[in-house]
Image: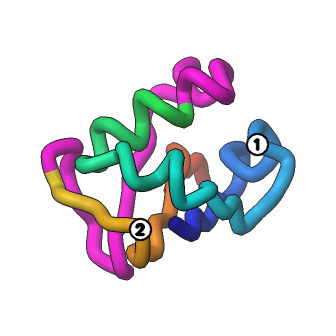
Amino acid sequence: MKILLFGITRDIVGESPLQLPRGESAALQTVGDLKTYLKGHYPRLGTLSSLAVAVNQKYTGDDARIGEEDEIALIPPVSGG
C-alpha cells in the first residue's frame, strides 16, 4: 500500500511516499484501520486537529474500504491567510 504524505504528515513520518509491507497492509480493511495503525506507529499524527484521507484521489471517510493496491494520501490541516 502506497501512502502519500504532505506537509506536517511528511515531517512526522520522515518520508513520502510511505510503502507499507504487504503483510501489514493486508490487515487494514478501512481508512479508520489505517489511521489507527499509523497513529500507533507515529503518535504525533494523533495530535493533528484533523487528517483528511483520499483513496485513489477521492476524499473518503473512516469507513471506506481500502486494499493493498490503493494509493492513499494523508492531507493535514491547511492554514492560510
23 left or right of 10? left
Say which of marks 2 and 1 sits in front. 2
**Which residue is painted at 36% across and 44% down in the image?**
27
Viewer-side residue, 54 vs 7: 54
What colouring method underlies this structural image?
Answer: rainbow
Q: CA distance from mark 2 to mark 1?
A: 20 Å
Q: Is residue 8 magenta?
A: no
Residue 70 point in image, percent of width and height? 39, 74
Residue 6 in the image: above or below residue 35: below
Which kind of residue does numbered mark 1 sit on?
A: Val
The crowding category of the residue bearing disc 1, from other C-alpha atoms within 10 Å (few below 14, some 14 to 19, many at least 20), is: some
Q: Which residue is mark 2?
A: 68
Residue 44 point in image, percent of width and height? 67, 22
Q: Is residue 43 magenta?
A: yes
Which kind of residue does numbered mark 2 sit on?
A: Glu
The crowding category of the residue bearing disc 2, from other C-alpha atoms within 10 Å (few below 14, some 14 to 19, many at least 20), is: some
20 left or right of 18? left
Residue 51 in the image: above or below residue 64: above
Look at the numbered disc 1 and give the secondary structure of its residue: helix
Viewer-side residue, 16 vs 47: 16
**Which residue is painted at 76% across and 42% down in the image?**
13
Q: Which residue is mark 1?
A: 13
Question: What stretch of residues is rendered in magenta?
Answer: 39-63
Viewer-side residue, 79 vs 54: 54
Kindly indicate whether the residue at mark 1 contacts the one at mark 2 (C-beta within 8 angstroms).
Answer: no
Residue 42 point in image, percent of width and height? 67, 28
Which label's residue is closer to the chain start, 2 or 1? 1
Look at the numbered disc 2 and give the secondary structure of its residue: loop
